[in-house]
Image (cartoon, rainbow, N blue to C red):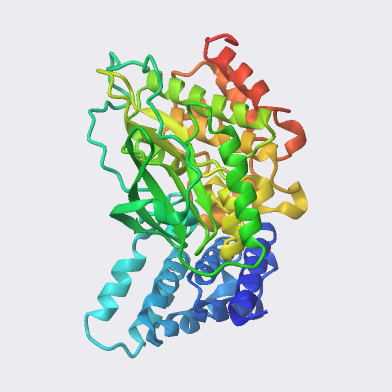
C-alpha cells in the first residue's frame, strides 16, 4: 500500500472510532490524529479535522495538550494544507478559546496580517447555544466528487415557503430528454468548461444524431483509479441507464472508460434542490417529494439502489411551460460507492446526510435499499422543515445520526399533519429492521399522511 493509501486507511479508521467511541481517545490518540494533517491528501486532512472536532465535543481534555502542536502546523508548507488545520482549530476554540489564541500568537508567521487572517478564518466555526460548534462556512466539496454538476444558471421566479397563494403549478408533461447514443468520448464536442470537482472535470458538450444537435454534460475522472474501478464503473453506469426511463431520473447519454472513466448525462439548466430548500412553498415541496420518492420506487423495482441520495443529487430541468415548476430529477445513481474508492471519506455522502449504517457500519450493517429509505426521509424532512434534524459540525452530526432519534418535523413546521411525524420517524429509525420495508410502503404512507391517498 502506498503512502496515500495508508493515510486514507488510517483516516477512515480514526474517523469511524471518533463517531462510535469518541471518549476512548487520549492524548496519544489525538497525537496520532495530528499526523494526518500533514498528509498530501485533502480528504485525509478533512477526515482528521472532523474526528478532532468530535473528540473535542465529547472529551475536550484529551485535546487540550495538543493545541500548540496543531497550531504549529500552520507554520509548515504548503499553505494549501492549512485549511483543515484552521477548521480543527475552530472546533477546539469553542472549548479552549484562550488556549487556541495563545497558540496562534506564539507562531512564527511570515507577516503581521497572517494571525488576523487565521483568527478570522476559524471564527467561521461559531459555538452554538448548547456548546456545540456550528459551521457557518459551506461544507467542503470533497463529497461532490463524481457527483459534481454544472453551476447554477437558473433565474426563474421563485417564492418563499411562506408566500400564499402559491405561484405556478406542476408541469402537464415532463421536459423532453436527450437521446442515448452508442458513442466514444470523442463524439462529444466541448462548448464550455463547467468546472472541476475533487475527482472529475466537467464540460458542457454537444453531440449529433440523425435528427438534431443535442446539449449534454460530460464528466471525466481527473486521476488514475484502482484497477478494479473500470469494471465497477461500467456496471454502475449500466444500472443507472437501465432505470433512467423514469421522468424524475436524470438520463445517461453515454459512458466509457477510455482514456479515463467518463459519462455523459442530460444537461440541466436549473439549480440543485440544495440551493432551493428555503424558497419552496409547501405545495411545491409536496410535489417535489412525491416525484423524488416515485423515482426511487421505480429504480428499486428494477433492483437498482442509489446509496447516496442528498438534495445536491436532485437537479431541476426547465419545463418551458408558462407558470410551471421546474422538474426535479435524481442524478448520480450508485456514484457514492464509486466515490468511496477514491477518497478517505468513508460515507460517500456529506456527514449531515449520513445514514446510521454509513456512520457506524459495524453496528448497523452495510448500505442497501433501506439506506435510500433513510435518505428519502431526510430529504422530505428538510423540504418541509427547511433544515435537517441534526445541524452541527460534521463530527457531531455523524455521532447524532448513529445515536439519537431526530426531533419531530412538526417541531420546525407546525402546519404539517401530525401523521407526517410518524411517517418520517419510521423512515429515520436507526435500525434498518424498523424502517419501512420498501420505498413503496414509505410512499404510500407519506401520501396518506399528506392527504393524497395512495394514487
Quadrant of residue 321 within the rendered picture: top left
- Viewer-proximal residue, 74 or 192? 192
Q: Is residue 129 left or right of residue 368?
A: left
| Image quarter hosting the N terminus | bottom right
Q: Is residue 276 left or right of residue 41?
A: left
| Image quarter hosting the C terminus | top right
- Viewer-proximal residue, 136 or 225? 225
- Residue 271 position, x and y percent, is 34, 39
- Is residue 22 visible from the viewing direction of this image? no
Question: What residue sits 43% from the left and 80% below the top?
Answer: 71
User: Where is 79 relative to 365, above or below?
Assistant: below
User: Where is 72 relative to 160, above or below?
Assistant: below
User: Where is 45 relative to 288, above or below?
Assistant: below
- Is residue 378 visible from the viewing direction of this image? yes
- Residue 64 position, x and y percent, is 53, 76
Q: Is residue 167 left or right of residue 316?
A: left
- Residue 220 position, x and y percent, is 45, 58
Residue ranking furthest to the front: 210
Question: What residue sits 63% from the left and 61% below the top?
Answer: 229
Question: What residue sits 66% from the left and 31% below the top?
Answer: 300
- Residue 258 position, x and y percent, is 52, 61
- Viewer-proximal residue, 401 or 439? 439
User: Where is 285 relative to 138, above or below?
Assistant: above
Quadrant of residue 232 within the rendered picture: bottom right
- Count of numbered marks: 0
Question: What residue sits 35% from the left and 54% below the top?
Answer: 203
Amino acid at each position: 500500500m502506498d503512502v496515500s493509501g495508508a493515510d486514507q486507511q488510517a483516516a477512515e479508521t480514526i474517523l469511524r472510532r471518533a463517531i462510535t467511541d469518541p471518549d476512548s481517545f487520549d492524548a496519544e490518540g489525538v497525537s496520532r490524529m495530528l499526523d494526518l494533517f500533514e498528509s498530501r491528501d485533502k480528504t485525509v486532512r478533512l477526515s482528521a479535522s472532523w474526528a478532532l472536532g468530535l473528540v473535542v465535543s465529547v472529551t475536550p481534555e484529551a485535546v487540550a495538550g495538543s493545541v500548540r502542536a496543531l497550531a504549529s502546523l500552520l507554520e509548515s508548507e504548503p499553505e494549501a494544507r492549512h485549511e483543515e488545520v484552521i477548521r480543527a482549530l475552530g472546533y477546539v476554540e469553542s472549548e479552549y478559546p484562550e488556549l487556541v489564541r495563545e497558540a496562534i500568537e506564539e507562531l512564527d508567521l511570515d507577516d503581521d496580517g497572517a494571525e488576523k487572517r487565521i483568527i478570522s478564518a476559524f471564527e467561521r466555526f461559531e459555538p452554538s447555544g448548547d456548546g456545540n460548534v456550528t459551521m457557518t462556512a459551506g461544507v467542503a466539496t470533497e463529497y461532490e466528487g463524481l457527483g459534481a454538476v454544472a453551476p447554477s444558471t437558473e433565474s426563474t421566479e421563485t417564492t418563499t415557503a411562506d408566500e400564499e397563494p402559491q405561484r405556478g403549478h406542476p408541469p402537464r408533461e415532463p421536459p423532453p430528454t436527450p437521446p442515448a447514443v452508442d458513442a466514444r468520448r470523442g463524439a462529444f464536442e466541448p462548448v464550455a468548461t463547467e468546472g472541476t470537482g475533487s475527482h472529475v472535470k466537467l464540460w458542457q458538450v454537444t453531440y449529433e444524431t440523425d435528427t438534431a444537435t443535442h446539449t449534454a454534460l460530460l464528466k471525466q475522472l481527473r486521476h488514475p483509479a484502482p484497477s478494479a474501478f473500470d469494471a465497477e464503473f461500467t456496471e454502475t453506469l449500466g444500472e443507472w441507464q437501465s432505470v433512467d426511463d423514469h421522468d424524475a431520473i436524470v438520463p445517461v447519454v453515454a459512458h466509457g472508460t477510455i482514456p479515463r472513466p467518463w459519462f455523459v448525462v442530460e444537461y440541466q439548466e436549473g439549480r440543485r434542490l440544495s440551493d432551493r430548500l428555503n424558497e419552496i412553498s409547501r405545495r411545491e415541496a409536496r410535489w417535489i417529494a412525491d416525484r423524488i420518492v416515485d423515482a426511487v420506487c421505480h429504480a428499486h423495482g428494477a433492483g437498482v439502489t442509489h446509496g447516496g441520495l442528498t438534495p445536491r443529487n436532485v437537479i431541476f430541468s426547465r419545463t418551458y411551460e408558462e407558470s410551471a415548476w421546474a422538474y426535479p430529477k435524481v442524478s448520480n445513481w450508485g456514484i457514492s460507492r464509486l466515490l468511496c474508492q477514491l477518497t478517505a471519506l468513508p460515507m460517500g455522502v456529506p456527514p449531515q446526510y449520513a445514514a446510521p449504517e454509513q456512520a457506524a457500519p459495524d453496528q448497523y450493517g452495510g448500505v442497501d435499499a433501506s439506506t435510500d429509505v433513510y435518505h428519502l426521509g431526510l430529504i422530505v424532512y428538510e423540504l418541509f422543515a427547511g433544515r435537517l434534524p441534526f445541524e452541527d459540525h460534521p463530527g457531531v452530526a455523524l455521532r447524532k445520526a448513529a445515536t439519537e432519534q431526530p426531533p419531530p418535523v412538526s417541531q420546525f413546521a407546525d402546519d404539517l399533519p401530525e401523521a407526517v411525524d410518524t411517517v418520517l420517524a419510521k423512515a429515520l429509525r436507526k435500525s434498518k429492521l424498523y424502517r419501512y420495508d420498501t420505498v413503496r410502503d414509505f410512499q404510500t404512507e407519506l401520501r396518506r399522511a399528506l392527504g393524497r391517498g395512495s394514487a
